[in-house]
Image (cartoon, rainbow, N blue to C red):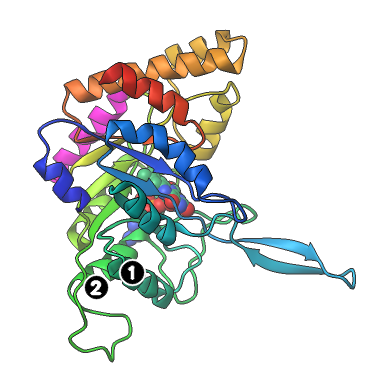
């Protein structure tokens, strides 16, 4: 079922989880071990992130260093199919513009369609770690809106390969990213929201937010979207904090603020175990308010910390 249908059919707040594909060379069993306990809470869907390839220098046998492309976490499409088959739950693959031509994207969408996956979260992606700014693939997309348009076109039977006539129409529900604290490259929130509206007009169905630690920012964001006549559901993205280092890592990597009260509590912690407890309590508090105020979905960036999310779910359900 599509994410948009899950939301439309629900009376109460739904829950969803997000996982990363295992590192290349690792078994999918590690991912199942991560998800198994969480399935008790009957998530409506599970998102699987997409990771672009990175360029590294590898020493050849003749001693010369060679620049090669490696994708450390491949398999998003296959993992989505595996998750749907293993748990009978809907999966939402993330698709990114970075590193992909339009043809490669089209082929990925055809694979998804054949696998019965009718959800996609359409994203631009970021620059590779060793590059400062995002550069589009020469035959790919510059912004997420162009990916949204490509998926929407496929839903109408319009293929990039333009000699296909009367092509099969896909039926993807298209999600996009939203930033309650604005995207770091946007000059301001208003302009960021202007582009979000363009994505809605291009065919996007719903927004999943970047993680936030201050619910007030989410509610203000909803108001700002409403003022711009954006009426898509907004899935609330939450992340468990588990280490002291995240006090500086999260703002620098994800461009989000941590509230003073939360930061002070974390600073007082003696061990990362203590931080996990603070993170868990904070998430419980965020969830309770989001549920009370009828957020359509609470989406957990479970990443490497399923136990905290498990404890939170136990406390809020
Ligand atoms: P865009 O919508 O293209 O926006 C990027 C910037 O350009 C913004 O500043 C925006 O205001 C501006 N902009 C948008 N449209 C236009 C336009 N037409 N003209 C000029 N400026 C414009 N990354 C991954 O690599 N893999 C993942 O799996 C992944 N999952 C994510 C899931 C969520 C819920 C979120 C919030 C982010 C995720 N990301 C992921 C990170 C995301 O790719 C980055 O945040 C990226 O920098 C922006 O993606 P976007 O889709 O918002 O881009």
* Residue beneath the point at 24% across and 25% down: 290
Inspect the magenta stretch and tell me whether residue 221 lies in it. yes
Q: Which mark is residue 109?
A: 1
Can residue 35 be seen in the rendering of this structure? yes
Quadrant housing residue 73: bottom right
Q: Mark 2 sits on what residue? A: 154
Residue extending furthest bottom?
Answer: 163
Q: Crowding at label 1, few (<14), some or many (≥20) Cα neighbours within 10 Å?
A: many
Quadrant housing residue 60: bottom right
Looking at the picture, tell me which residue is in the foreground, 96 or 61: 61
* Spatial separation of the CA atoms under disc 2 and disc 1: 8 Å
Looking at the picture, tell me which residue is in the foreground, 82 or 147: 82
Q: Which residues are magenta?
A: 215-231
Q: Crowding at label 2, few (<14), some or many (≥20) Cα neighbours within 10 Å?
A: many
Residue 308, x across and y down, in percent: 44, 24
Can residue 92 be seen in the rendering of this structure? no
Q: Are marks 2 and 1 in contact (CB under 8 Å)?
A: yes
* Residue beneath the point at 87% across and 70% down: 61
- Dominant secondary structure, magenta: helix
Q: Earlier in the sequence, mark 2 or mark 1?
A: 1
């Amino acid at each position: 079922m599509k994410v948009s249908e899950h939301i439309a059919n629900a009376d109460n707040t739904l829950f969803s989880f997000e996982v990363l594909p295992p590192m290349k060379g690792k078994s999918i069993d590690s991912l199942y071990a991560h998800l198994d306990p969480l399935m008790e809470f009957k998530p409506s869907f599970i998102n699987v992130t997409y990771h672009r390839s990175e360029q590294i220098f590898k020493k050849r046998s003749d001693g010369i260093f060679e620049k090669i492309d490696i994708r450390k976490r491949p398999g998003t499409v296959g993992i989505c199919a595996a998750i749907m088959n293993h748990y009978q739950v809907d999966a939402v693959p993330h698709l990114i513009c970075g590193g992909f031509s339009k043809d490669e994207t089209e082929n990925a969408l055809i694979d998804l369609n054949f696998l019965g996956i009718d959800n996609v979260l359409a994203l631009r992606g970021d620059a590779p770690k060793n590059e400062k700014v995002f550069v589009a693939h020469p035959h790919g997309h510059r912004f997420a809106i162009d990916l949204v348009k490509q998926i929407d076109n496929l839903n109408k039977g319009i293929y990039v390969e333009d000699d296909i006539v009367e092509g099969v129409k896909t039926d993807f529900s298209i999600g996009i990213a939203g930033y309650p604290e604005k995207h770091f490259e946007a000059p301001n929130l208003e302009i960021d929201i202007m582009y979000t509206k363009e994505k809605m007009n291009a065919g996007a169905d719903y927004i999943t937010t970047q993680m936030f630690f201050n619910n007030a920012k989410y509610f203000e964001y909803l108001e700002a979207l409403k003022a711009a006549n954006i009426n898509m559901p907004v899935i609330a993205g939450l992340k468990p904090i588990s280490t002291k280092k995240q006090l500086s890592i999260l703002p620098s990597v994800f461009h989000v603020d941590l509230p003073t009260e939360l930061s002070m509590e974390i600073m007082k912690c003696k061990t990362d175990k203590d931080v996990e407890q603070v993170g868990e309590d904070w998430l419980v508090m965020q969830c309770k308010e989001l549920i009370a105020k009828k957020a359509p979905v609470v989406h957990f960036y479970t990443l490497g910390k399923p136990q905290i999310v498990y404890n939170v779910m136990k406390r809020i359900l």
